[in-house]
DNA sequence: CGGAGCCTTGACCAGCATCAAGTATGGTGG
DNA sequence: CCACCATACTTGATGCTGGTCAAGGCTCCG
């Protein structure tokens, strides 16, 4: 498995480079991070709530959810992480977790010791800046989730989530249809949108009947992207994908 | 006004010090930040949506809301900032705003040029770390807001917000009652909790009738803290106030 | 003393939750 | 290859939480 490391880290590096400017040396430091792989079964926590962690997790394959619990037992997913996401980079500066990370489907993760991330960030402060910036994109996404559950009706909530994931995965359109694997249950969709599984089922049916999108066998198919974007009130700018280079600030001058 | 600067910056520094370890030199750099004051009237934006900003805003007095808009015109407040908060420190690494900042009541802010913050962070990387960490606390709060609007009923939502603000303000208890000024309208409370102003009014009445808390003339009075905490499902740990020093990681060794 | 904004209350309604029962689907062991 | 089981999905009936619409009252300020 050792050979795969750099390929998977490269995907994370590409993510960083889409928003930050890094020198050769800085890029190399990312690719040299030590790590080890782990497979996580569906509904299994790989980071617990309230734990002290000393590793960060990169999603290699599958989907992970960030779970926040309310005391009455109701679960709420506050983020969905896709391959290439560093799901808890923030743990580097905040080791005590305030939410749990759970695999939504069979998921492969890479654990990277904080120690290695910290020493790289200390040696090359521009890396710390890139990490910080990436965390803030997650925050912008989270902010939109508050809007989603706070102000949109059920159809728009589900539609918005589908649009968001499709955009983050850069799912391509083929013959007018956007497809991507999305192995999450309707119950998990409900936990992400603040609805019940029964109502999610009805809404998916409505989206299918209206010809917007359908979820069949763990795969999403968007049949009418423009229409879905409209009912979902989706505006991709908050995701900050493809920030033009001249809009990428750098605290430290390029060496 | 020049003399007041350091006092107001000291409040922000105290905030940083409660979660990060900073040397004398680093602390001095915070207190030396240049800034200028500004008064903002209620419902006035002091940072617009989609703008490119080159200053960060510290709340000196009053309350500010972070507004995210959905296309159909429904407003959602995604964060409330209290005095001592740097409301948009994240703009240092992300200059294009994805949400607006608006004064909820008559508010005094301090604008601090990014240029000064960046040069301090570049010279003293531990400051960048402290800023990053503080941003992540805001993210943890945001995450709880998703739970709030997604999974709690109206009474718990309002209760939780009141508990959160009381805790962040460190409002003291006097004769069994916790009081603090909270000059926001019921309409703004509705925007923060994903409810309507009419329903907020009814819920406030219910909280009053139940003897938990009341909002009179722009002041909150919590009569039964334990009871309110219980109906609101409030657990203050996520706010990360008073992190013990040994739980404050530092990427860079103390000089 | 008048007006604007905010608060309050009532009547009615809709979106989503809840409860319940039945149907696919996929994995496992024989 | 099939029988079985667990999990997920589907659908219907019913009701509650919170939205909508409307009208009137309070408070502060000029």
Image: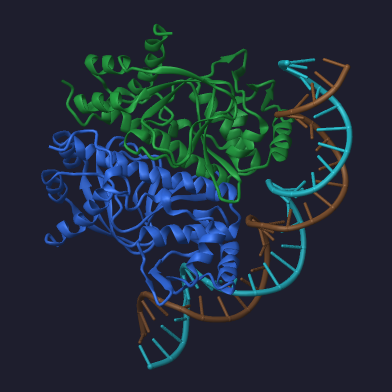
Chain colours: A blue, B green, C brown, D cyan
Q: Quadrant of residue A64?
A: bottom left
Q: Is residue B197 left or right of residue B229?
A: right
x 37%, y 28%: residue: B55
**Residue B97, percent from left and from top:** 42, 39
**Residue A183, percent from left and from top:** 40, 66
Q: Seen from this angle, which residue lies furthest top? A: B3
Image quadrant holding the C terminus of chain B, namely top left
Q: Is residue A238 above or below residue B132?
A: below
Residue A73 visible within the image? no
**Residue A145, percent from left and from top:** 49, 48
Q: Is residue B44 left or right of residue B118?
A: right
Count the labels in the image: 0
Q: Is residue A191 above or below residue D30?
A: below
Residue A186 visible within the image? yes
* Residue nearest the viewer, comparing B205 with B4: B4
x 35%, y 62%: residue: A170
* Residue nearest the viewer, comparing A164 with A33: A164
Q: Is residue A148 left or right of residue A81?
A: right
**Residue A179, percent from left and from top:** 40, 71
Q: Quadrant of residue B156?
A: top right
x 32%, y 29%: residue: B131
Image quadrant holding the N terminus of chain B, namely top left
x 36%, y 40%: residue: A97
Q: Is residue A3 above or below residue B228?
A: below
């Amino acid at each position: 498995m050792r050979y795969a490391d750099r390929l998977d880290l490269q995907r994370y590096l590409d993510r960083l480079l889409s928003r930050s400017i890094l020198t050769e040396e800085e890029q190399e430091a990312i690719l040299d991070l030590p790590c080890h792989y782990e497979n996580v079964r569906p509904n299994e926590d790989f980071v617990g709530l309230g734990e002290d962690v000393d590793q960060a997790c990169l999603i290699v394959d599958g989907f992970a959810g960030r779970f926040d619990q309310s005391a009455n037992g109701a679960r709420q997913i506050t983020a969905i992480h896709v391959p290439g996401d560093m799901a808890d980079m923030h743990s580097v500066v905040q080791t005590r977790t305030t939410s749990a990370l759970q695999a939504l489907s069979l998921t492969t993760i890479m654990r990277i010791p904080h120690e290695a991330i910290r020493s790289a960030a200390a040696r090359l402060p521009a890396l710390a800046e890139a990490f910080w910036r990436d965390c803030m994109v997650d925050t912008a996404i989270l902010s939109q989730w508050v809007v989603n559950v706070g102000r949109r009706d059920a159809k728009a909530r589900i539609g918005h989530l589908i649009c968001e994931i499709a955009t983050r995965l850069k799912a391509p359109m083929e013959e007018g249809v956007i497809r991507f694997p999305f192995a999450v249950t309707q119950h998990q969709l409900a936990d992400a949108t603040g609805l019940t599984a029964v109502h999610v089922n009805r809404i998916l049916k409505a989206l299918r009947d209206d010809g917007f999108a359908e979820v069949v066998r763990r795969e999403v198919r968007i049949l009418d992207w423009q229409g879905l974007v409209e009912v979902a009130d989706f505006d991709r700018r908050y995701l900050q994908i493809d920030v033009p280079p001249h809009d990428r600030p750098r605290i430290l001058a390029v060496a």
